[in-house]
Image: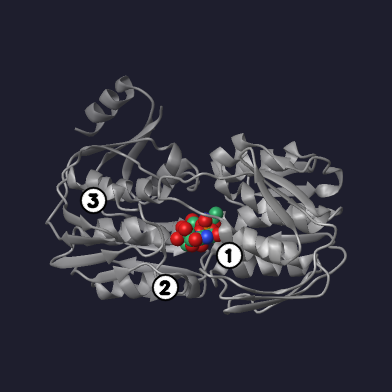
Amino acid sequence: MEQYIIKGGNPLVGEVEIGGAKNAALAILAAAIMTDETVFIDNLPDVNDINVLLDAIAGIGASVHRVDRHAVKINGKGVSDFNIEYDYMKKIRASYYLLGALLGKYKRAEVALPGGCNIGSRPIDQHLKGFRALGADVEIEHGKIIAEADRLVGKHIYFDVVSVGATINVMMAAAMAEGLTILENVAKEPHVVDVANFLNSMGANIRGAGTDVIKIRGVHRLHRTEYSVIPDQIEAGTFMFAAAATRGDVTVCNVIPKHLEATIAKLLEIGCEVEEFDDAVRVVSKGRLTSTHVKTLPYPGFPTDMQPQIGVTLALCEGTSMVTESIFENRFKYLDELARMGANVKIEGNSATIEGVKGFSGARVSAPDLRAGAALCIAGLAADGITIVDDIVYIQRGYERFEEKLKSLGGIIERVQSEKDIRKFTLKVS
Ligand code: UD1
Protein backbone atom coordinates (compact mmCIF):
# COMPACT_ATOMS: atom_id res chain seq x y z
CA MET A 1 0.00 0.00 0.00
CA GLU A 2 1.43 3.37 -0.94
CA GLN A 3 1.61 6.30 1.46
CA TYR A 4 2.68 9.89 1.36
CA ILE A 5 5.39 10.96 3.74
CA ILE A 6 5.69 14.67 4.30
CA LYS A 7 8.13 16.89 6.12
CA GLY A 8 6.16 20.01 6.93
CA GLY A 9 7.16 23.58 7.48
CA ASN A 10 8.06 24.80 3.99
CA PRO A 11 5.78 27.48 2.56
CA LEU A 12 4.60 26.47 -0.91
CA VAL A 13 5.88 28.94 -3.48
CA GLY A 14 5.64 29.05 -7.28
CA GLU A 15 3.32 28.24 -10.17
CA VAL A 16 1.30 25.10 -10.67
CA GLU A 17 -0.52 23.94 -13.81
CA ILE A 18 -4.09 22.78 -13.18
CA GLY A 19 -5.45 19.84 -15.18
CA GLY A 20 -8.86 19.12 -16.67
CA ALA A 21 -11.89 18.78 -14.40
CA LYS A 22 -12.32 15.15 -13.35
CA ASN A 23 -16.03 15.49 -12.70
CA ALA A 24 -16.71 17.11 -16.07
CA ALA A 25 -14.51 14.58 -17.86
CA LEU A 26 -16.31 11.58 -16.36
CA ALA A 27 -19.68 12.70 -17.72
CA ILE A 28 -18.22 13.79 -21.06
CA LEU A 29 -16.52 10.41 -21.60
CA ALA A 30 -19.81 8.63 -20.92
CA ALA A 31 -21.66 10.98 -23.30
CA ALA A 32 -19.06 10.29 -26.01
CA ILE A 33 -20.64 6.88 -26.71
CA MET A 34 -23.88 8.60 -27.80
CA THR A 35 -22.69 8.88 -31.40
CA ASP A 36 -21.43 6.29 -33.91
CA GLU A 37 -18.80 8.78 -35.03
CA THR A 38 -15.38 9.35 -33.48
CA VAL A 39 -15.14 11.86 -30.66
CA PHE A 40 -11.82 13.42 -29.63
CA ILE A 41 -11.56 14.64 -26.03
CA ASP A 42 -8.61 16.62 -24.73
CA ASN A 43 -7.47 18.08 -21.39
CA LEU A 44 -8.45 14.91 -19.53
CA PRO A 45 -6.83 14.48 -16.14
CA ASP A 46 -4.71 11.32 -15.99
CA VAL A 47 -6.23 9.97 -12.78
CA ASN A 48 -7.54 6.58 -11.70
CA ASP A 49 -11.25 7.44 -11.92
CA ILE A 50 -10.88 8.41 -15.58
CA ASN A 51 -8.94 5.26 -16.41
CA VAL A 52 -11.54 3.03 -14.75
CA LEU A 53 -14.37 4.70 -16.67
CA LEU A 54 -12.47 4.30 -19.96
CA ASP A 55 -12.17 0.57 -19.16
CA ALA A 56 -15.91 0.40 -18.51
CA ILE A 57 -16.57 2.13 -21.84
CA ALA A 58 -14.25 -0.26 -23.70
CA GLY A 59 -15.93 -3.13 -21.82
CA ILE A 60 -19.32 -2.46 -23.47
CA GLY A 61 -17.78 -2.53 -26.94
CA ALA A 62 -16.80 1.08 -27.72
CA SER A 63 -13.37 1.65 -29.18
CA VAL A 64 -11.15 3.68 -26.90
CA HIS A 65 -7.86 4.99 -28.24
CA ARG A 66 -5.66 6.83 -25.76
CA VAL A 67 -3.94 9.41 -27.97
CA ASP A 68 -1.73 10.58 -25.13
CA ARG A 69 -1.89 11.02 -21.37
CA HIS A 70 -4.56 13.72 -21.63
CA ALA A 71 -6.41 12.93 -24.84
CA VAL A 72 -8.59 10.08 -26.05
CA LYS A 73 -10.57 9.11 -29.15
CA ILE A 74 -13.78 7.22 -28.51
CA ASN A 75 -16.01 5.58 -31.07
CA GLY A 76 -19.29 4.22 -29.76
CA LYS A 77 -20.35 2.39 -32.93
CA GLY A 78 -19.38 -1.00 -31.56
CA VAL A 79 -21.38 -0.72 -28.34
CA SER A 80 -23.15 -4.05 -28.06
CA ASP A 81 -23.47 -4.59 -24.34
CA PHE A 82 -25.71 -2.34 -22.25
CA ASN A 83 -24.68 -3.76 -18.93
CA ILE A 84 -22.25 -2.01 -16.55
CA GLU A 85 -21.05 -4.44 -13.91
CA TYR A 86 -20.84 -3.85 -10.15
CA ASP A 87 -17.05 -4.04 -10.31
CA TYR A 88 -16.91 -0.72 -12.15
CA MET A 89 -19.62 0.86 -10.06
CA LYS A 90 -17.79 -0.15 -6.91
CA LYS A 91 -14.62 1.55 -8.11
CA ILE A 92 -16.27 4.61 -9.51
CA ARG A 93 -19.79 5.79 -8.85
CA ALA A 94 -19.81 8.06 -11.87
CA SER A 95 -20.15 4.94 -14.06
CA TYR A 96 -23.84 5.74 -13.55
CA TYR A 97 -23.48 8.37 -16.27
CA LEU A 98 -23.51 5.44 -18.70
CA LEU A 99 -27.13 4.94 -17.65
CA GLY A 100 -28.21 8.28 -19.14
CA ALA A 101 -25.92 7.89 -22.14
CA LEU A 102 -27.03 4.34 -23.03
CA LEU A 103 -30.68 5.02 -22.32
CA GLY A 104 -30.59 8.16 -24.50
CA LYS A 105 -28.90 6.48 -27.46
CA TYR A 106 -30.05 2.84 -27.24
CA LYS A 107 -33.16 3.22 -25.04
CA ARG A 108 -31.76 0.50 -22.83
CA ALA A 109 -29.26 0.30 -19.98
CA GLU A 110 -28.41 -1.98 -17.07
CA VAL A 111 -26.14 -0.52 -14.46
CA ALA A 112 -25.26 -1.92 -11.06
CA LEU A 113 -26.81 0.15 -8.29
CA PRO A 114 -24.17 2.28 -6.59
CA GLY A 115 -24.05 1.88 -2.83
CA GLY A 116 -23.26 4.55 -0.27
CA CYS A 117 -19.69 5.73 0.05
CA ASN A 118 -17.33 7.21 2.57
CA ILE A 119 -18.92 10.63 2.49
CA GLY A 120 -22.39 9.33 3.21
CA SER A 121 -25.42 7.60 1.73
CA ARG A 122 -25.91 8.78 -1.80
CA PRO A 123 -29.38 8.12 -3.22
CA ILE A 124 -29.99 8.35 -6.97
CA ASP A 125 -33.78 8.66 -6.79
CA GLN A 126 -33.72 11.94 -8.73
CA HIS A 127 -31.87 10.34 -11.65
CA LEU A 128 -34.49 7.58 -11.79
CA LYS A 129 -37.36 10.03 -11.40
CA GLY A 130 -36.06 11.88 -14.46
CA PHE A 131 -35.67 8.74 -16.59
CA ARG A 132 -39.16 7.57 -15.65
CA ALA A 133 -40.62 10.97 -16.51
CA LEU A 134 -39.09 10.66 -19.98
CA GLY A 135 -41.02 7.41 -20.41
CA ALA A 136 -38.47 4.80 -19.38
CA ASP A 137 -39.47 1.76 -17.43
CA VAL A 138 -36.97 1.65 -14.55
CA GLU A 139 -36.72 -1.39 -12.29
CA ILE A 140 -34.28 -2.34 -9.59
CA GLU A 141 -33.56 -6.07 -9.69
CA HIS A 142 -30.73 -8.10 -8.19
CA GLY A 143 -28.73 -4.99 -7.32
CA LYS A 144 -29.09 -3.52 -10.79
CA ILE A 145 -30.95 -0.61 -12.29
CA ILE A 146 -32.62 -1.76 -15.47
CA ALA A 147 -33.94 1.08 -17.62
CA GLU A 148 -35.75 0.51 -20.90
CA ALA A 149 -37.99 2.50 -23.18
CA ASP A 150 -39.65 2.03 -26.57
CA ARG A 151 -39.28 5.76 -26.98
CA LEU A 152 -38.23 8.63 -24.75
CA VAL A 153 -40.48 11.67 -24.88
CA GLY A 154 -39.60 15.15 -23.60
CA LYS A 155 -41.24 16.21 -20.32
CA HIS A 156 -41.31 19.00 -17.75
CA ILE A 157 -39.30 17.66 -14.81
CA TYR A 158 -38.80 19.32 -11.43
CA PHE A 159 -35.93 17.97 -9.33
CA ASP A 160 -36.66 17.78 -5.58
CA VAL A 161 -33.01 18.27 -4.68
CA VAL A 162 -30.29 20.07 -6.57
CA SER A 163 -28.13 17.23 -7.87
CA VAL A 164 -25.17 17.46 -10.22
CA GLY A 165 -25.41 13.79 -11.14
CA ALA A 166 -29.18 13.77 -11.76
CA THR A 167 -29.03 16.98 -13.81
CA ILE A 168 -26.31 15.61 -16.08
CA ASN A 169 -27.71 12.08 -16.36
CA VAL A 170 -31.23 13.18 -17.26
CA MET A 171 -29.87 15.89 -19.60
CA MET A 172 -27.95 13.22 -21.51
CA ALA A 173 -30.99 10.97 -21.91
CA ALA A 174 -33.21 13.93 -22.89
CA ALA A 175 -30.70 15.05 -25.55
CA MET A 176 -31.95 12.14 -27.70
CA ALA A 177 -35.60 12.08 -26.56
CA GLU A 178 -38.47 13.24 -28.79
CA GLY A 179 -39.54 16.86 -28.30
CA LEU A 180 -38.86 19.35 -25.54
CA THR A 181 -37.64 18.53 -22.03
CA ILE A 182 -37.59 21.23 -19.38
CA LEU A 183 -35.50 20.51 -16.29
CA GLU A 184 -36.15 22.72 -13.28
CA ASN A 185 -34.18 23.18 -10.05
CA VAL A 186 -31.05 21.87 -11.75
CA ALA A 187 -27.43 22.02 -10.60
CA LYS A 188 -25.47 24.97 -12.01
CA GLU A 189 -21.93 23.68 -11.50
CA PRO A 190 -19.37 24.53 -14.20
CA HIS A 191 -19.19 20.88 -15.16
CA VAL A 192 -22.94 20.78 -15.87
CA VAL A 193 -22.32 23.61 -18.34
CA ASP A 194 -19.29 21.81 -19.76
CA VAL A 195 -21.27 18.62 -20.43
CA ALA A 196 -24.06 20.65 -22.08
CA ASN A 197 -21.48 22.42 -24.26
CA PHE A 198 -19.94 19.08 -25.18
CA LEU A 199 -23.32 17.59 -26.15
CA ASN A 200 -24.16 20.72 -28.15
CA SER A 201 -20.86 20.39 -29.99
CA MET A 202 -22.12 16.89 -30.99
CA GLY A 203 -25.34 18.40 -32.35
CA ALA A 204 -27.57 18.38 -29.26
CA ASN A 205 -29.88 21.31 -28.60
CA ILE A 206 -29.49 22.24 -24.91
CA ARG A 207 -30.09 25.76 -23.60
CA GLY A 208 -29.86 27.28 -20.14
CA ALA A 209 -27.12 25.14 -18.54
CA GLY A 210 -25.64 27.24 -15.74
CA THR A 211 -29.07 28.60 -14.77
CA ASP A 212 -31.88 26.98 -12.73
CA VAL A 213 -33.74 25.80 -15.83
CA ILE A 214 -32.36 23.72 -18.69
CA LYS A 215 -34.33 23.29 -21.93
CA ILE A 216 -33.47 20.40 -24.17
CA ARG A 217 -34.92 19.82 -27.60
CA GLY A 218 -34.18 16.23 -28.47
CA VAL A 219 -32.35 15.29 -31.68
CA HIS A 220 -32.28 11.98 -33.61
CA ARG A 221 -28.56 11.68 -33.86
CA LEU A 222 -25.36 13.13 -32.49
CA HIS A 223 -22.15 13.47 -34.45
CA ARG A 224 -18.37 13.69 -34.17
CA THR A 225 -16.68 16.45 -32.23
CA GLU A 226 -13.39 17.61 -30.77
CA TYR A 227 -13.62 18.96 -27.27
CA SER A 228 -11.37 20.20 -24.48
CA VAL A 229 -12.51 19.67 -20.87
CA ILE A 230 -12.63 22.73 -18.55
CA PRO A 231 -9.98 23.18 -15.83
CA ASP A 232 -10.56 21.51 -12.47
CA GLN A 233 -11.80 24.08 -9.97
CA ILE A 234 -11.35 21.66 -7.07
CA GLU A 235 -7.75 20.82 -7.92
CA ALA A 236 -7.09 24.56 -8.24
CA GLY A 237 -8.82 25.33 -4.95
CA THR A 238 -6.83 22.60 -3.20
CA PHE A 239 -3.55 24.28 -4.17
CA MET A 240 -4.96 27.69 -3.21
CA PHE A 241 -5.74 26.48 0.31
CA ALA A 242 -2.36 24.73 0.42
CA ALA A 243 -0.80 28.14 -0.23
CA ALA A 244 -2.91 29.68 2.55
CA ALA A 245 -2.20 26.98 5.14
CA THR A 246 1.57 26.91 4.52
CA ARG A 247 1.87 30.75 4.44
CA GLY A 248 2.96 30.45 0.85
CA ASP A 249 2.64 32.25 -2.48
CA VAL A 250 1.15 30.06 -5.20
CA THR A 251 -0.21 30.87 -8.64
CA VAL A 252 -2.63 28.32 -10.07
CA CYS A 253 -2.38 28.44 -13.87
CA ASN A 254 -4.83 27.32 -16.58
CA VAL A 255 -7.93 28.03 -14.49
CA ILE A 256 -11.18 29.92 -15.03
CA PRO A 257 -11.13 32.45 -12.13
CA LYS A 258 -14.93 32.86 -12.32
CA HIS A 259 -15.33 29.21 -11.24
CA LEU A 260 -13.20 29.91 -8.15
CA GLU A 261 -15.22 32.83 -6.78
CA ALA A 262 -16.44 31.10 -3.61
CA THR A 263 -12.93 29.88 -2.82
CA ILE A 264 -11.41 33.30 -3.50
CA ALA A 265 -14.03 35.00 -1.29
CA LYS A 266 -13.13 32.75 1.66
CA LEU A 267 -9.39 33.21 1.16
CA LEU A 268 -9.87 36.99 1.23
CA GLU A 269 -12.04 36.72 4.35
CA ILE A 270 -9.31 34.90 6.27
CA GLY A 271 -6.71 37.47 5.26
CA CYS A 272 -4.93 36.11 2.16
CA GLU A 273 -4.05 38.35 -0.76
CA VAL A 274 -5.57 37.13 -4.02
CA GLU A 275 -4.67 38.38 -7.47
CA GLU A 276 -6.77 37.33 -10.47
CA PHE A 277 -5.43 37.12 -14.01
CA ASP A 278 -7.18 35.98 -17.23
CA ASP A 279 -6.43 32.31 -16.66
CA ALA A 280 -4.54 32.24 -13.37
CA VAL A 281 -5.03 33.15 -9.71
CA ARG A 282 -2.27 33.99 -7.24
CA VAL A 283 -2.74 33.42 -3.52
CA VAL A 284 -0.34 35.00 -1.04
CA SER A 285 -0.58 34.16 2.65
CA LYS A 286 1.44 36.22 5.10
CA GLY A 287 1.33 36.12 8.88
CA ARG A 288 -1.43 34.55 10.94
CA LEU A 289 -4.78 34.22 9.18
CA THR A 290 -8.12 34.84 10.91
CA SER A 291 -11.16 32.65 11.39
CA THR A 292 -14.37 32.69 9.37
CA HIS A 293 -17.55 30.67 8.91
CA VAL A 294 -18.41 28.58 5.89
CA LYS A 295 -21.38 26.54 4.73
CA THR A 296 -21.23 24.20 1.76
CA LEU A 297 -23.91 24.75 -0.87
CA PRO A 298 -24.57 23.90 -4.52
CA TYR A 299 -22.70 26.15 -7.00
CA PRO A 300 -22.19 29.10 -6.88
CA GLY A 301 -22.03 28.41 -3.12
CA PHE A 302 -18.93 27.06 -1.42
CA PRO A 303 -18.27 23.54 -2.81
CA THR A 304 -18.56 20.53 -0.52
CA ASP A 305 -15.50 19.15 -2.35
CA MET A 306 -13.47 22.03 -0.87
CA GLN A 307 -14.78 21.66 2.69
CA PRO A 308 -11.87 19.57 4.05
CA GLN A 309 -9.27 21.88 2.47
CA ILE A 310 -10.79 25.00 4.04
CA GLY A 311 -11.34 23.08 7.30
CA VAL A 312 -7.62 22.29 7.58
CA THR A 313 -6.75 25.92 6.87
CA LEU A 314 -9.27 27.28 9.40
CA ALA A 315 -7.79 24.99 12.05
CA LEU A 316 -4.66 27.17 11.78
CA CYS A 317 -6.48 30.52 11.77
CA GLU A 318 -6.73 32.74 14.81
CA GLY A 319 -10.18 32.53 16.43
CA THR A 320 -13.18 30.23 16.18
CA SER A 321 -14.58 29.09 12.84
CA MET A 322 -17.80 27.26 12.15
CA VAL A 323 -17.98 24.85 9.19
CA THR A 324 -21.42 23.62 8.15
CA GLU A 325 -21.70 20.73 5.68
CA SER A 326 -25.09 20.82 4.00
CA ILE A 327 -24.59 18.44 1.06
CA PHE A 328 -23.23 15.13 2.46
CA GLU A 329 -23.69 13.80 5.99
CA ASN A 330 -20.35 12.15 6.58
CA ARG A 331 -17.71 14.59 5.49
CA PHE A 332 -16.01 15.43 8.79
CA LYS A 333 -14.01 12.21 9.24
CA TYR A 334 -10.81 14.04 8.39
CA LEU A 335 -11.27 16.24 11.46
CA ASP A 336 -10.72 13.24 13.74
CA GLU A 337 -7.42 12.66 11.96
CA LEU A 338 -6.59 16.35 12.14
CA ALA A 339 -7.22 16.32 15.89
CA ARG A 340 -4.39 13.78 16.10
CA MET A 341 -2.17 16.48 14.61
CA GLY A 342 -3.20 18.95 17.28
CA ALA A 343 -6.30 20.61 15.81
CA ASN A 344 -8.97 21.72 18.24
CA VAL A 345 -12.31 20.67 16.79
CA LYS A 346 -15.78 19.76 17.97
CA ILE A 347 -18.32 18.15 15.67
CA GLU A 348 -22.05 18.38 16.28
CA GLY A 349 -24.31 16.99 13.58
CA ASN A 350 -23.47 18.70 10.32
CA SER A 351 -21.46 21.49 11.93
CA ALA A 352 -17.89 21.62 13.16
CA THR A 353 -16.55 24.25 15.51
CA ILE A 354 -12.87 24.79 14.91
CA GLU A 355 -10.75 26.67 17.42
CA GLY A 356 -7.60 27.76 15.61
CA VAL A 357 -4.25 26.51 16.91
CA LYS A 358 -0.81 28.01 16.24
CA GLY A 359 0.48 24.91 14.48
CA PHE A 360 0.00 21.20 13.78
CA SER A 361 2.46 18.50 14.74
CA GLY A 362 3.13 15.75 12.22
CA ALA A 363 1.44 12.38 12.84
CA ARG A 364 0.40 9.23 11.02
CA VAL A 365 -3.09 9.74 9.57
CA SER A 366 -5.40 8.00 7.09
CA ALA A 367 -7.10 9.55 4.08
CA PRO A 368 -10.82 8.90 4.61
CA ASP A 369 -11.75 9.88 1.02
CA LEU A 370 -10.42 11.79 -1.98
CA ARG A 371 -10.73 15.44 -0.92
CA ALA A 372 -10.16 14.75 2.76
CA GLY A 373 -6.97 12.91 1.80
CA ALA A 374 -5.70 15.93 -0.12
CA ALA A 375 -6.60 18.14 2.84
CA LEU A 376 -4.58 15.97 5.23
CA CYS A 377 -1.59 16.36 2.92
CA ILE A 378 -2.02 20.13 3.20
CA ALA A 379 -2.06 19.70 6.98
CA GLY A 380 1.15 17.66 6.75
CA LEU A 381 2.83 20.35 4.64
CA ALA A 382 1.90 22.97 7.24
CA ALA A 383 2.81 20.81 10.25
CA ASP A 384 5.90 20.69 12.33
CA GLY A 385 7.75 17.41 11.74
CA ILE A 386 6.82 14.36 9.73
CA THR A 387 3.35 13.28 8.65
CA ILE A 388 2.49 9.98 7.01
CA VAL A 389 -0.78 9.81 5.08
CA ASP A 390 -2.12 6.28 4.58
CA ASP A 391 -4.74 5.13 2.04
CA ILE A 392 -3.58 7.52 -0.67
CA VAL A 393 -5.38 5.47 -3.34
CA TYR A 394 -8.26 7.83 -2.65
CA ILE A 395 -6.12 10.84 -3.53
CA GLN A 396 -4.85 9.19 -6.70
CA ARG A 397 -8.44 8.82 -7.89
CA GLY A 398 -8.70 12.53 -8.47
CA TYR A 399 -5.32 14.31 -8.38
CA GLU A 400 -2.80 13.87 -11.16
CA ARG A 401 0.86 13.78 -10.07
CA PHE A 402 -0.19 15.32 -6.75
CA GLU A 403 3.13 14.89 -4.98
CA GLU A 404 5.11 16.04 -8.03
CA LYS A 405 3.11 19.25 -8.22
CA LEU A 406 3.54 19.87 -4.49
CA LYS A 407 7.27 19.19 -4.78
CA SER A 408 7.58 21.68 -7.64
CA LEU A 409 6.22 24.27 -5.18
CA GLY A 410 8.86 23.39 -2.58
CA GLY A 411 6.82 20.88 -0.56
CA ILE A 412 8.84 18.01 0.90
CA ILE A 413 6.73 14.98 0.09
CA GLU A 414 7.42 11.48 -1.26
CA ARG A 415 5.27 8.55 -2.25
CA VAL A 416 6.55 5.54 -0.36
CA GLN A 417 5.70 1.84 -0.20
CA SER A 418 7.45 0.39 2.83
CA GLU A 419 8.81 1.05 6.30
CA LYS A 420 12.25 1.02 4.68
CA ASP A 421 11.26 3.90 2.36
CA ILE A 422 9.88 5.78 5.38
CA ARG A 423 13.15 5.34 7.29
CA LYS A 424 15.12 6.49 4.24
CA PHE A 425 13.01 9.64 3.91
CA THR A 426 13.25 10.38 7.61
CA LEU A 427 17.03 10.08 7.54
CA LYS A 428 17.26 12.26 4.42
CA VAL A 429 15.20 15.12 5.89
CA SER A 430 16.43 15.04 9.47
C1 UD1 B 1 -21.06 15.33 -7.62
C2 UD1 B 1 -19.56 15.23 -7.62
C3 UD1 B 1 -19.03 15.25 -6.20
C4 UD1 B 1 -19.56 16.46 -5.44
C5 UD1 B 1 -21.08 16.54 -5.56
C6 UD1 B 1 -21.65 17.82 -4.97
C7 UD1 B 1 -19.12 13.94 -9.61
C8 UD1 B 1 -18.65 12.66 -10.19
N1 UD1 B 1 -19.18 14.00 -8.28
O1 UD1 B 1 -21.55 14.16 -6.97
O2 UD1 B 1 -17.60 15.28 -6.26
O3 UD1 B 1 -19.22 16.34 -4.09
O4 UD1 B 1 -21.47 16.51 -6.94
O5 UD1 B 1 -21.11 18.93 -5.60
O6 UD1 B 1 -19.40 14.89 -10.31
N2 UD1 B 1 -29.20 13.47 -3.96
C9 UD1 B 1 -30.43 12.88 -3.74
N3 UD1 B 1 -30.98 12.16 -4.77
C10 UD1 B 1 -30.37 11.99 -5.97
C11 UD1 B 1 -29.12 12.61 -6.17
C12 UD1 B 1 -28.56 13.34 -5.14
O7 UD1 B 1 -31.02 13.00 -2.67
O8 UD1 B 1 -30.91 11.33 -6.84
C13 UD1 B 1 -28.59 14.29 -2.87
C14 UD1 B 1 -27.24 13.73 -2.40
O9 UD1 B 1 -27.41 12.76 -1.40
C15 UD1 B 1 -26.57 14.98 -1.89
C16 UD1 B 1 -27.06 16.07 -2.84
O10 UD1 B 1 -28.25 15.55 -3.43
O11 UD1 B 1 -26.99 15.28 -0.59
C17 UD1 B 1 -26.10 16.46 -3.92
O12 UD1 B 1 -25.63 15.32 -4.59
P1 UD1 B 1 -25.18 15.34 -6.11
O13 UD1 B 1 -25.06 16.76 -6.57
O14 UD1 B 1 -26.05 14.41 -6.88
O15 UD1 B 1 -23.74 14.72 -6.04
P2 UD1 B 1 -23.08 13.76 -7.10
O16 UD1 B 1 -23.55 14.10 -8.47
O17 UD1 B 1 -23.20 12.35 -6.63
Q: Amino acid at mark 2?
A: Gly
Kindly report the distance in space between the C-alpha atoms of the residues bearing marks 3 and 2: 27 Å
Q: Between tags 3 and 2, which lies in front?
A: 2
Q: Quadrant of residue 260?
A: bottom left
Does the residue tagged 1 have its C-beta within 8 Å of any atom of ligand 1?
A: yes
Residue depicted at 28% across the width and 29% down the height = 425
Q: Amino acid at mark 3?
A: Ala
Q: Are marks 1 and 2 in contact (CB under 8 Å)?
A: no
Q: Amino acid at mark 1?
A: His
Kindly report the distance in space between the C-alpha atoms of the residues bearing marks 1 and 2: 14 Å
Give the secondary structure at mark 1.
Answer: helix
Q: Between tags 1 and 3, which lies in front?
A: 1
The residue that disc 1 covers is 191
Quadrant (top left, top right, bottom left, bottom right) of the C terminus: top left
Residue 18 position, x and y percent, is 50, 57
Q: Residues within 10 Å of mark 3 (few under 14, many from 20)?
A: many
Which residue is situated farthest in the top direction here?
420
- Please indicate, yes or no, whether residue 351 appears anywhere in the rendered image: yes
Q: Residues within 10 Å of mark 2 (few under 14, many from 20)?
A: some
Which of the labelled discs sits on residue 301, or is there none? 2
Residue depicted at 16% across the width and 51% down the height = 343
Which of the labelled discs sits on residue 382, or is there none? 3
Q: Quadrant of residue 263?
A: bottom left
Give the secondary structure at mark 2.
Answer: loop
219 left or right of 141? right
Give the secondary structure at mark 3.
Answer: helix
Which of marks 2 and 1 precedes in the sequence? Answer: 1
400 left or right of 332? right
Quadrant (top left, top right, bottom left, bottom right) of the N terminus: top left
Residue depicted at 79% across the width and 61% down the height = 225
Q: Is residue 34 above or below residue 220?
A: above
